[in-house]
Amino acid sequence: MPSHDLTPAPDDLFRCARCGDCCRGYGGTYVTPTDITAIAAFVGCPPDEFATRFCRTSGSRPLLAQGADGYCVFYSAGCTIHPVKPRMCRRWPFIDSVHTDPLNWSIMAGLCPGMRTGFAPERVRECVRRLLEEEEKGEGRS
Ligand code: SF4
Ligand code: SF4
């Protein structure tokens, strides 16, 4: 990275404190069709039964359901589907909504102790843009 590049590295912006707070409550975890296929195979559930057993819907989009304790159905002292966890969980906090509006970073940081603040919003957006671009080139997942 050139020395004049002021864009923070992902590690400058975020280090997970492993508190589990992001697996409880809040806005919910969207799952894409690719996520559903992978998770259903991992937990041994027919894909066409996955939404009924493990999701609720928000509009027309499926979200992972929560247990009575408010945690994601796949949380038990950590993520029990870590190898196949949804894109949204894998990308957190470098997610599309921060690229759309980098001010979302500060809002999210109020919920996630691993996120660092004090960076210019446009620098945060640029970091997220680069990561999303790398993901698009490398993973090709939706
Ligand atoms: S809330 Fe943030 S720091 Fe806590 S486990 Fe989730 S990502 Fe890590
Ligand atoms: S899938 Fe895993 S990482 Fe994502 S919210 Fe559920 S328990 Fe947390």
Image (cartoon, helix red, strand yellow):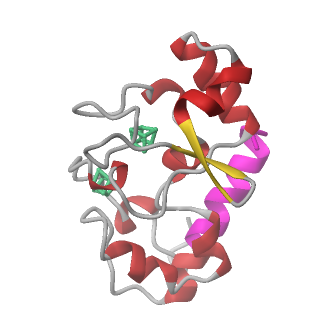
Residue at 59% across / 67% down in the picture? 128
Image position of 51 with respect to 1: above or below:
above
Place of residue 77 in the rendered image (x, y in percent of width and height, measured from the top left): 21, 32
Q: Which residues are magenta?
A: 127-142
Count numbered badges in the picture.
Answer: 0
Q: Quadrant of residue 31?
A: top right
Residue at 49% across / 47% down in the picture? 89
Place of residue 20 in the rendered image (x, y in percent of width and height, measured from the top left): 26, 48
Give the side of residue 43 with respect to residue 71, left or right: right
Q: Is residue 131 magenta?
A: yes
**Which quadrant holds the C terminus?**
top right
Image position of 60 with respect to 120: above or below:
above
Place of residue 76 in the rendered image (x, y in percent of width and height, measured from the top left): 27, 30
Give the side of residue 85 with respect to residue 87, left or right: left
Place of residue 101 in the rendered image (x, y in percent of width and height, measured from the top left): 61, 83
Residue at 55% across / 27% down in the picture? 53
Image position of 15 with respect to 139: above or below:
below
Q: Main secondary structure of the magenta part?
A: helix
Q: Is residue 61 magenta?
A: no
In front of the other: 6 or 13: 13
Residue at 55% across / 64% down in the picture? 1
Q: Quadrant of residue 48?
A: top right
Give the side of residue 76 with respect to residue 13, left or right: left
Is residue 6 visible in this depiction of the protein?
A: no
Is residue 123 visible in this depiction of the protein?
A: yes
In front of the other: 61 or 101: 61
| Ligand 1 lies in quarter | bottom left
